[in-house]
Image (cartoon, helix red, strand yellow):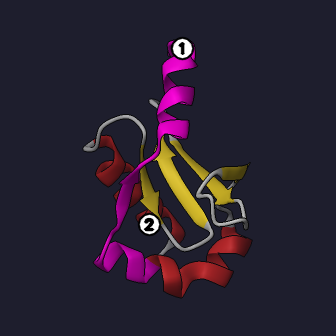
């Protein structure tokens, strides 16, 4: 699987879920649809499930995580995160153009 294929499939899957739903990509990373694009984030390492920081899924990270993320596509896991839902409710509306 190529990075662009993964991103396309993930976008499609997330758009079909309610706001605040995260794709649980691994035990340390999640992603969600922000209304315009997919946002990727690391989870805190204190096992709270809270977001630590946002990151860009680039070619370097894809090279490191290709196997894990490709397996995720075969058996996707999702969860509801109040933290993410709250951010999305507070976000200003997206204006194209």
Instruction: Give the left or right position of residue 85, taking residue 83 as reference.
Output: left
Identify the secondary structure beneath mark 2: helix
How many residues crowd around disc 2 within 10 Å: few (fewer than 14), some, or many (20 or more)? some
Instruction: Give the left or right position of residue 73, taking residue 39 as reference.
Output: left
- Circle 1 residue: 97
Q: CA distance from mark 2 to mark 1?
A: 26 Å
Label annotation for residue 6:
2
Q: Position of residue 31 (x, y in %)?
A: 52, 53
Q: Position of residue 30 (x, y in %)?
A: 54, 59
Disc nearest the viewer among 2 and 1:
2
Can you say which quadrant of the picture contains the C terminus?
top right
Res 27 → quadrant: bottom right
Indicate yes or no whether the magenta region holds residue 4: no
**Residue at 44% over, 30% down:** 35
**Residue at 31% over, 50% down:** 12
Instruction: Give the left or right position of residue 13, taking residue 40 as reference.
Output: left
Farthest residue in the left direction? 16
The reply to whether residue 1 is visible in this rendering is no
Q: Position of residue 56 (x, y in %)?
A: 69, 54
Q: Position of residue 92 (x, y in %)?
A: 56, 13
Magenta part of the chain: 70-97
């Amino acid at each position: 699987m190529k990075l662009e294929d993964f991103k396309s499939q993930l976008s499609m899957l997330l758009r079909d879920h309610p706001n605040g739903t995260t794709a649980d990509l691994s035990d340390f990373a999640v992603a969600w649809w922000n209304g315009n694009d997919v946002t990727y984030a690391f989870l805190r390492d204190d096992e709270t499930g809270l977001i630590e920081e946002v990151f860009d899924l680039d070619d370097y990270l894809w090279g490191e995580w290709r196997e894990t993320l490709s397996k995720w596509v075969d058996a996707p896991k999702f969860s509801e995160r109040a933290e993410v839902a709250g951010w999305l409710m507070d976000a200003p509306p997206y204006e194209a153009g």
